[in-house]
Amino acid sequence: MSAYLAKRLGIAAVTLVLASLVVFSVLEIVPGDPARLMLGMNASDAQVEQLRDQMGLNAPLIVRYLDWIGGLLTLDFGRSYTYSVPVIDLVAERIAVSLPLALVALTLSTAIAIPVGLYSASRRGEAGDAVAMGAAQLGVAIPNFWFALMLVYLFAVWLRWVPAGGFPGWSAGMWPALKSLLLPAVALALPQAAILARVTRSALIEVLNEDYIRTARAKGMPYRAVLWRHALRNALIPVVTIMGLQFAFLLAGTIIIENVFYLPGLGRLVFQAITQRDLVVVESVVMLLVATVIAVNLIVDLTYAIVDPRLRSRS
Amino acid sequence: MKSWKSFLAASALTLAFGTAAFAARTDLVIGIPLEPPHLDPTAGAAAAIDEVLYANVFQGLTRIGPAGEVLPDLAESWTISDDGKAYTFKLRTGVKFHDGTDFNADDVKFSLDRARADDSVNAQKALFAAIDTVEVVDPATVKVSLKTPQGSFLYNMGWGDAVMVAPESAATNKEKPIGTGPFKFDSWAKGSAIKLVKADGYWGDPVFLDKAEFRIVPDAAAAVPALLSGDVQAFPFFQPDGVAQIEGDPRFKVVVGATEGETLLSINNKKPPFDQLKVRQAISYALDRKAIIDGASAGLGTPIGSHQSPASKAYVDLTGVYPHDVAKAKELLKEAGFENGIKATLKLPPPSYARLGGEIIASQLREVGIDLEIIPVEWAQWLDQVFKQKDYDLTIVSHTEPNDIDIYSRKDYYFNYDNPAFDKVIEELNLTSDETKRNELLGEAQKILADDAVVGFLYELPKVGVWDAKLEGMWQNAPIQANDLTKVKWAD
């Protein structure tokens, strides 16, 4: 187990270094000067140079790269050019929105997907299966920003149960904050649930065709017990893999939904930082996300070992 | 007995609602599309900074009023020496910054010296370029001496970039702005909202609102439901294409006004074949301004024929110099030797006026034989490639700075336009402070630009404001990019 873990960690470290090189050089190549962007069209070139000096942009590339990496290693993520506050503060504020949103969405999608997948797999070919998988197909096909807008018109404009968007902050209280995350979570969860339900169904069907299922049935085990105890557990590996990928996506890839609900999440922070050429923010947040994805993958790998005892003994 | 009870209940209800109706609302949530990068108007070009803070939190010696006029603000009055080179400002007394420190002549000297210092990062440093010295005469009097007379000096001092700041708080204004205005900064949840509250002990007319929140709603599609659900009560700068969904709803007002944004098809005047007058004239003839306004701005916006806002007193209507005339455009191209057509690029920044307008313009120019390749760019790229390196043929951009016709006389500006006759008019304008004479010179300048077909003059960007029908005192026009809340109130 420890050898398995050490190998995983080694791969993770190499990935991080490569990612940092890619992120840094890509942002150097992209045209656009943060100083000019801040000063606008009426400022002289000399003034832009002045600001570049103040921002430390005129230092040689290698010095800036090493400064940045050195900072990361000591958990100093640098200061945002545009907001001129520490990047870590910005990220902390955004994670307070993005993480709960991702967790609520993932919980919702799992709560919908697993029962639907179980139901469909056990009723394969029947009318119920066709309806469930038809709905899942629809869930994958509907663009989530459109679905989000429909939710807004129904629940915020017409029924007025929840706000149309925005985030009051956790200081406004648990319920107002959660309430404003509800619609975005549903909008995010639905397409994810649709995908997850399809994966669950096909994984289960494959397992249900195995010999040991027939054996279990033959020894007189009730169908329901076979489904839960043998089939679902064995079908979980692809399901957990997809959930891991979905979590990483939900954390940072939700820029469209964040825009529709004008939520101050991580996705919008990165997007805004890219358009404003706030290089430090982009670099540090992207690295943070890379680290998160790697960590999630690591957790998924470890989960395999829990789900499947064979993986444990093999290593 | 039963009927008595319900009667009592009903009257109690009427009473409750009645009193509620008497006390008008004193809070307001305003939607803005872009978040300010920071909150110091003297250290950045982003219009979003002024949209939150100008006139609300920060004030200058003078201020720009709703009609674009210069009004006294922290300077109660002023005198101008006969040679036009010395301005003596009489300051208001009893003015305090929001942190409790006094505002006086030292702060004026500090603010102006800071803005024009060598290491200043003021985005509009040119506003202060004429200042020679700033002297404190007494705590309530400041004398500003100019190197040369500057006709627009009082106007310049009304810009957001020229607001008064205190030495104690100047360095931290980006995060925690401290001004002298009727509202003080309360909090900023990044990416979400900026809150202001009424300031105690304000020196001027009391404001009606107790709380004002600027909520960042970046997506135009999200603005409509935000308004309909009542979450946001006003969008002073609304996307024109969303208007159709709100119009006709009695709960809201749609107010269309003018901005200072001259929307231009900018031309690189040094790059062949656009260095030829006939080619530029052909472009001007090929443009159908009405079709562009309909397609790119939902039919809202006033056509322009030169670089001046139609709302300005100095405006001269020159849209007739090059009317839409395809035959004439083709003829001019032929005369210039391009009967086989021209190939060029059109770089488009992100705003919808550029992206939508660009496609319409490309099809209009194709009709006369100019084949444009459309290249979409981000703002950062646009500033770098088009504005700085002048690596472009044509581009579309709205010049939103007020009274900025002098940009055509700037050396090395991205138009690459060079006309000594025009420069002379601008030079004279700078030395003139008499309004009638200034307007005459501005008219002359507009005519030169129109005749030279320096760029394709398209239309004045409209200011489309949408807000709750019960809200009063919002600005119709945007002579500067600001949301002045000093007169805003809820009708009873």
Image (spheres, coloured by chain):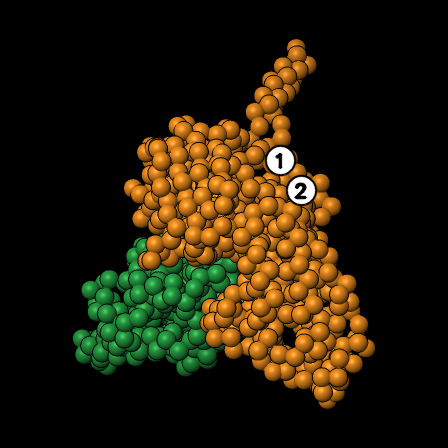
The x and y percentages for residue B147 are 43, 52
Q: How many marks?
A: 2
Pointer 1: what residue? Answer: B472
Instruction: Give above or below for B280 relative to A106.
Output: below
Q: Quadrant of the N terminus of chain B?
A: top right
Residue B362: in sight, yes or no?
no
User: The chain shown in green is which?
Assistant: A
Tell me where residue B24 sits by quadrant: top right
The amino acid type, in three-letter code, at marker 1 is: Glu
Residue lying furthest right: B327
- Indicate which label's residue lies in the foreground, 2 or 1: 1
Image position of A20 (left or right of A150): left
The x and y percentages for residue A13 are 24, 76
**Residue sitting at x 49%, y 34%:** B77
- Residue B53 is marked as none
Q: Chain of mark 1?
A: B
The amino acid type, in three-letter code, at marker 2 is: Phe
Disc 1, SS? strand
Q: Chain of mark 2?
A: B
Pointer 2: what residue? Answer: B252
**Residue sitting at x 55%, y 59%:** B427
Instruction: Give above or below for A3 relative to B222.
Output: below
Compare marks 2 and 1 and give the one earlier in the sequence: 2
Residue placed most toward the observer, B4 or B485: B485
**Residue sitting at x 68%, y 82%:** B371
The tint of chain B in the picture is orange
